Amino acid sequence: MVNIIWVLMTIIGIVFAIINGTIEQVNEAVFKGAKEAVTICIGLISILVFWLGLMRIAQDAGLLQKLANLFQPIVKRLFPEVPVNHPAMGYILSNMMANLFGLGNAATPMGIKAMEQLRELNGGSTEASRSMITFLAINTSSLTLIPTTVIAIRMTYDSASPTEIVGTTLVATFASTVGAIMIDRYFHYRRTRKKGGK
Amino acid sequence: MGIVSLVSLYIIPVIIGFILIYGTLKKVPTYEAFVEGGKEGINIAFSIIPYLVGMLVSISIFRASGAMDFFVEFLRPALQFIGVPAEIAPLAIIRPISGTAALGMTTDLIATYGPDSFIGRLASTLQGSTDTTFYVLTVYFGAVGIKKMGDALKVGLLADLVGIIASLVIVTLIFGY
């Protein structure tokens, strides 16, 4: 899908430039855009290195594990079909913690492991189970504590206060997560009702 | 609402201090662990270069040609009616589809309108508060061979919509339009 959007945006732009007579600006934009992208990525290095370095300390100190244990009672209610001591629960919690602390790379493998376990719990079916949908809903609503990359970009463009959006991001991410859980519950309710109740 | 800006100000130093003290108490070789984790950051920064170059060149062409203005002006009346700046529309559309593409758009919006403008703050909040639904869906379900996704896509996209609305409301409340 992103392929189509990418090509469309470029082609529409070129066609527009031909009609509008802005082809000169477009020529310039190609090289400026590419240069800008590389500048941004270099700018990102500082904050990514710092944050992922700090998070490694947290991980080695067992801090993420501890937080996962703390959240277990809540997560247990979100996934009523998953037994507490099942490995799926551990992977779900580690995935959520990694997401929370912006360890995107660490979060994905844990998420896949969680999915594997959830599939096993579902008898190996290729159909998405209730828990899988809940897990995806929470993941796509993005639990983020510190939006590292965004802060780095704001710094690059000389924001007066690059971190001022941490609070608004927290509130918005909380709202979308709660929303996701409620939407997930609603669809679950609708499914069970269609099947003639539990 | 003062509490939100207060949290924004204190949360990062507090987390840094807490992790360092906790790590030291747990006898983690803090500096070495930091360096190990940091190396991963370098890899991430370099690995997103092609994504960002591709997307920013495409957006630059779209913008420089005048097509972006046309698109934004076309959407403006409808969006203004519900209090949304039309400039944010392309980001809201691409956010669920591609994370790196959205990162490119956020960067472009911040560069064009400034990080401390309403659009800059809204783009920043939006980028941090929603995730790439299609990516998560494809990777997680693809990896374990789930073929029927049930309501997953609907739930994911509706959650994105909640995130977009929530970002709009909170940014307006905290920083003003």
Image (tube, rainbow, N blue to C red):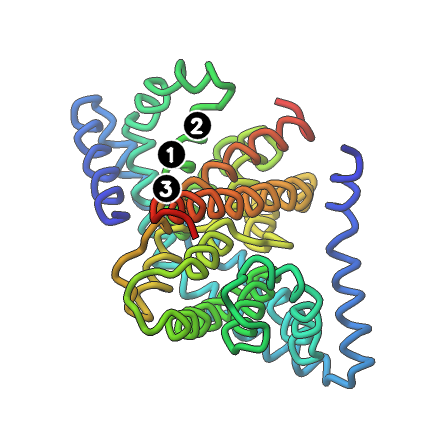
What's the CA distance linking mark 2 and mark 1? 7 Å
What's the CA distance linking mark 1 and mark 3? 6 Å
Q: Residue B121 shows which numbered tag? A: none
Query: The residue under label 1 is which amino acid type?
Result: Pro
Count up the numbered dots.
3
| Residue position marked by numbered label 2 in the rendering | B87
The chain carrying label 3 is B
Left or right: where B27 falls relative to B121: right
Q: Nearer the viewer, mark 2 or mark 3?
A: 3
Q: Secondary structure at mark 3?
A: helix
Pointer 2 with pointer 1, Cβ within 8 A: yes
**Where is residue A131 drawn, in percent x and y?**
45, 61
* Dots 2 and 3 on the same chain: yes
Residue under the point 41% across and 48% down? A197
Q: Secondary structure at mark 1?
A: helix
Residue under the point 37% across and 37% down? B93
| Residue position marked by numbered label 3 in the rendering | B94
| Residue position marked by numbered label 1 in the rendering | B90
Query: The residue under label 2 is which amino acid type?
Result: Glu
The chain carrying label 1 is B
Out of A62 and A56, give the one closest to the viewer.
A62
**Where is residue A107 drawn, in percent x and y?**
50, 67
Left or right: where B32 falls relative to A14: right
Residue under the point 59% across and 80% down? B36
Q: Secondary structure at mark 2?
A: helix
Pointer 1 with pointer 3, Cβ within 8 A: yes
